[in-house]
Amino acid sequence: MKRMIIALALLVIGAATGATAQDAPRRHTYLNPDAPIEERIEDALSRMTLDEKIAIIHAQSKFSAPGVPRLGIAEIWCTDGPHGIRPEVLWDEWEQARWTNDSCIAYPALTCLAATWNRQAADLYGVSIGEEARFRDKDVLLGPGVNIYRTPLCGRNFEYMGEDPYLAAQMVVPYVRGVQRQGVAACVKHYALNNEELHRHTVDVDLSDRALYEIYLPAFKAAVIEGEAWSIMGSYNKYRGTYACHNDRLLNQILKGEWGFDGVVISDWGGTHSTIEAIRNGLDMEFGSWTDGLTEGASNAYDMYYMAQPYKQLIASGEVGTEELDDKVRRVLRLTFRTAMNPYKPYGAMCSEEHSAAARYIAEEGIVLLKNESNNLPISADAKRILIVGENAIKMMTVGGGSSSLKVKYEVSPLDGIRSHYGDRAEVIYARGYVGDVTGDYNGVVTGQDLSESRTAEELIAEAVELAKGADHVIFIGGLNKSEKQDCEGADREDITLSYGQDAVIEALAEATDHLTVVFVSGNAVAMPWIDDVESVVQTWFLGSEAGNALARILAGDVNPSGKLPFTFGVKLEDYPSHAEGMTFPNPDKVYYKEDIFVGYRGFEKSRIKPLFAFGHGLSYTTFEYGDLTLSADEIGADETLHATVTITNSGDRAGKEIVQLYIGDNKSSLPRPIKELKGFEKVELQPGESTSVTFAITKEALSFYDDRVGAWCAEPGKFTLYVGSSSADIRLSKAFRLK
Ligand code: GLC
């Protein structure tokens, strides 16, 4: 009876007010996930006050921006880094918040990803790291980095994808798309020309438009146009006198104008230096000014940000209007609706078996066998005593290096990986060999390792040599270690020679054994004065959580190495074009990139300097033959496509993968061009004796250069040479053709 009366009463009220039970309060368009995103943006914008618009375009904490609480527009949370999801930090500090549920899987550093030359691996990488970011409820992943490896001394090369714009462009796109499929924005960095660390906040870079468009921008352009990146991070340095975080040419003219970027430009942390320039030159979100938010700024530092109260004052004074502000707000809302307020985004995952498997797969695909004399590798199956020498066999490498430092669920060191791989099949003994960096604390992430060592260098070498005499195989594991000037943000290396007396250890070991393998854990080229005395050299990058497992499987031969170098190993520093006569490095103030487009192998080939190991070089435990390169035509029109087909055969006795590389040279051009440039690659897996054919489609884009006399790309008619090979220095076939 009672229910009847209530229902009756409701009916009467409803009738009186015209509302009926089924008329829930109408959801505003901006809250309707099925409404077109642009309509959601306009609806939200129309409801925001000036203060709310100013609030969402700058940080409220170290890594977050406030959204609009009153309207239920979500906060935006950012996280480092390109190799794994950074542990939580305190609201305003770089210091760890010491949570107990934020340990991650560390994936290999991005030079390793580039060294895989495997587009599927880049997709897997993006999906995996994107899932960890999503699970940690992050909306923007501050990565990947794609700055070109101009000099081997740049401290952050390990975070980037090598010296060639085509390779970096091909590898960054799947990574970006994989991350963003998880409802997390990639934030491709550092845009642009961040090619040195020590004076990164002050260096003012200038270069020709050819070098800018042909070398330093392509990876960013691909990330934006093919990758559809939702955000881009401005770099600290200046370009032609104006900071990159608010540089009209880089941001308004090129990024948003020529490339049609509809996402958000986020400053690097502390990269904003001017309110009026930030307003007018295309910055959309300001983070990290005064770095830790409060102590160096006023008590209400976030309100004092360049794009906070100072911006509001310029509007109040009439010096600026609100059209730039509305554009920034639209972009931030678009980012919000793509990520935080995208109800269809997945839930992510953390530290899953799939993520461990992905980390190991990418590591195995990226390890590069540089030298392997008399089949010294893989380690012989009847080796009973294996000696491991070197600090990098035991030192944790998922920490350090700057903002990409991580707190991992686990990390398998090379020594542990090799030991667990061999079990009791062989005795694996260890000698320190040398002492490098014994730090154990990284912004509050404590490794728990005690690397202290009281013995002298001579004693350590004597111990290693003594043990080497009785070992069947000796593996030296050294390189760099992400401590300062050893592949680390904020500082550059001072030379390419190995530190900590490693060369002396290697030379002593070379005397003591005929089965010496040198393994480098690093993200950069190093000099190898002892190269003729060592049987094998393996470049293994900073490999992340699965480092030891991947390395062990390669050394033992369970996995056939298939990586290729994404940058050139020069014999000495002066061989690099950016360190040739008259070049300066590092640069506290102005620097002009005098080597122009001749970066990396482009420069080595121009000056006919033989590298120690060439761009694209990498050996296998099997061999590959290249046969009959055929072209679909011997000339093409400007709008036609040339197809080049080559067959590859595995002529060895075990399965393996080969990265077939296509280079193109312009035989005659009205402006200087490199002898050849990478314009295609395919990684193919072949069983012993198996053959396959690879076809490259070549259009005029692959033949073009940027003509800075007219500010446009152009392909000049005439003769071109097409090179196919196993590295830039190991060309197996070539053919000429003409562009009509
Ligand atoms: C750092 C780095 C950048 C990083 C940011 C946040 O200074 O340059 O790569 O994402 O600040 O840590």
Image (tube, helix red, strand yellow):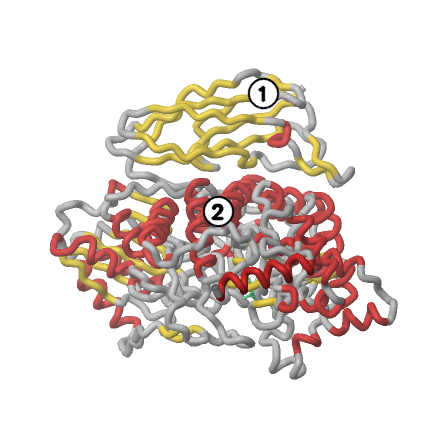
Q: Judge whether residue 150 can be spotted in this image.
A: no
Q: Is residue 51 toward the left or the right of residue 473 in the image? A: right
Residue 160 on image: x %, y %: 51, 53
Disc 2, SS: helix
Tell me what residue is drawn at x 60 percent, y 31 percent: 702
Mark 1, residue position: 737
Disc 1, SS: strand
Residue 418 on image: x %, y %: 23, 56
Point out the frontmost of discs 1 and 2.
Answer: 2
Tell me what residue is drawn at x 20 percent, y 57 percent: 420
Disc 2 marks which amino acid?
Answer: Gly
Of the two numbered discs 1 and 2 on the same chain, state the one appearing first in sequence.
2
Q: Residues within 10 Å of mark 2 (few under 14, many from 20)?
A: many
Q: In terms of image quadrants, where is residue 202?
A: bottom right
Q: Residues within 10 Å of mark 1 (few under 14, many from 20)?
A: some
Disc 1 marks which amino acid?
Answer: Phe
Disc on res. 285: none
Q: Judge whether residue 659 can be spotted in this image.
A: yes
Disc on res. 178: 2
Q: In terms of image quadrants, where is residue 321?
A: bottom right
Total residue callouts? 2
Ligand 1 image position (quadrant): bottom right
